[in-house]
Amino acid sequence: MLLENKVVVVTGGSRGIGRAIALASAREGADVAINYWRDNDQSYGKASAVESIVGEIEALGRRAIAVEGNVAERGTGIELIRRTVEAFGHVDVLSSNAGICPFHAFLDMPPSVYETTVAVNLNGAFYVTQAAANQMKAQGTGGAIVATSSISALVGGGMQTHYTPTKAGVHSLMQSCAIALGPYGIRCNSVMPGTIATDLNADDLADEAKRAYMEKRIPLGRLGNPDDVAQCVVFLASDRARYVTGASLLVDGGLFVNLQ
Ligand code: RM4
């Protein structure tokens, strides 16, 4: 068990990559605190997305709490960590995963779309990382922070001019936090998912031509699934990565390197 009796906090943990990270962490022996925002995903039958992920974790014999809050607000991260410590006594791992990508053209993008994307993806990552790191420092036993950056930190998207800078920012945040937090034994790394099929891009990939184009560009020949990313997050969170900090790991099926 790579995360035996660890306490893992996952933002955006009820759906998509975050859900997979929460489940993978529980499978590796962790108790999990899930942050979510507006539990209106009805794709899990009668149970809500939050109820179903909590139930799946508990079915594995691990404990789970779900705490609603918009990570864009500084207080959400503080409350999430408080509720986690209240429930489980400490925090070992933060998966700073919450993010949005409302695809939109650049020239007519409304300020609200830009500002909300920056607030959730970048400000949110900063505030939750700060809250978790302060708790880890107070505990005095180190910790691991893994942010969900993106291949989009390294390359652009014509409909993602608001989004890609936030993912580059998350990547850079982890590099600087690795320096700031290293003295406390807190490691900070990022994963860089490629095109992973989730509800974040379901509308975009509903366009068969776009989906076929992306699949053709990926050397492994398929879109990623959330657990492909979750396994890498578990590795970076675990003691197997004990000497890894300030690093980033592409999880993209070879998409980034594939020019021709
Ligand atoms: C990723 C990458 C993918 C896109 C998602 C929403 O960073 O750009 O292609 O589907 O974001």
Image (cartoon, rainbow, N blue to C red):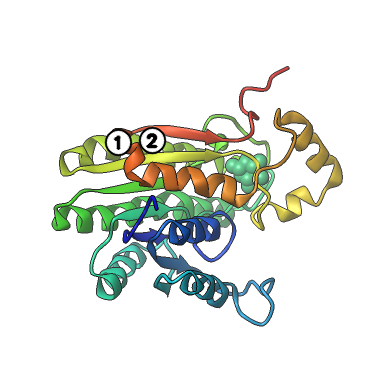
Residue 14, horizontal then vertical, whole percent? 53, 66
Residue labelled 1 has its Cβ within 8 Å of some atom of ligand 1? no
- 229 or 5, which is in the foreground? 5
Q: Which image quadrant is residue 6 in?
A: bottom left
* Figure quadrant of the C terminus: top right
> Mark 2, residues whose alpha carbon is within 10 Å: few (<14), some, or many (≥20)?
some
Q: Of all residues shown, which one is farthest toward the right? A: 209
- Asked if one can make out residue 10 in the rendered structure from this viewpoint, the answer is yes
What's the residue type where badge 2 is placed?
Ser
Residue ID at (31%, 69%): 84
Q: Label 1, on which residue?
A: 176
Figure check: 250 above or below 181: above
Residue 141, horizontal then vertical, whole percent? 17, 51
Q: How far apart are marks 1 and 2 (CA)?
A: 6 Å
Q: Of all residues shown, which one is farthest toward the front? A: 1
What's the residue type where badge 1 is placed?
Ser
Residue 238, horizontal then vertical, whole percent? 36, 46
> Mark 1, residues whose alpha carbon is within 10 Å: few (<14), some, or many (≥20)?
few
Residue ID at (68%, 50%): 197
Q: Which image quadrant is residue 41 in?
A: bottom right
Figure check: 66 above or below 188: below
Q: Label 2, on which residue?
A: 172
- Asked if one can make out residue 106 in the rendered structure from this viewpoint, the answer is no
Q: Of all residues shown, which one is farthest toward the top? A: 260
Q: Are dots 1 and 2 in contact, CB under 8 Å?
A: yes
Dot 1: what SS? helix
Residue labelled 2 has its Cβ within 8 Å of some atom of ligand 1? no
Figure check: 112 above or below 57: above
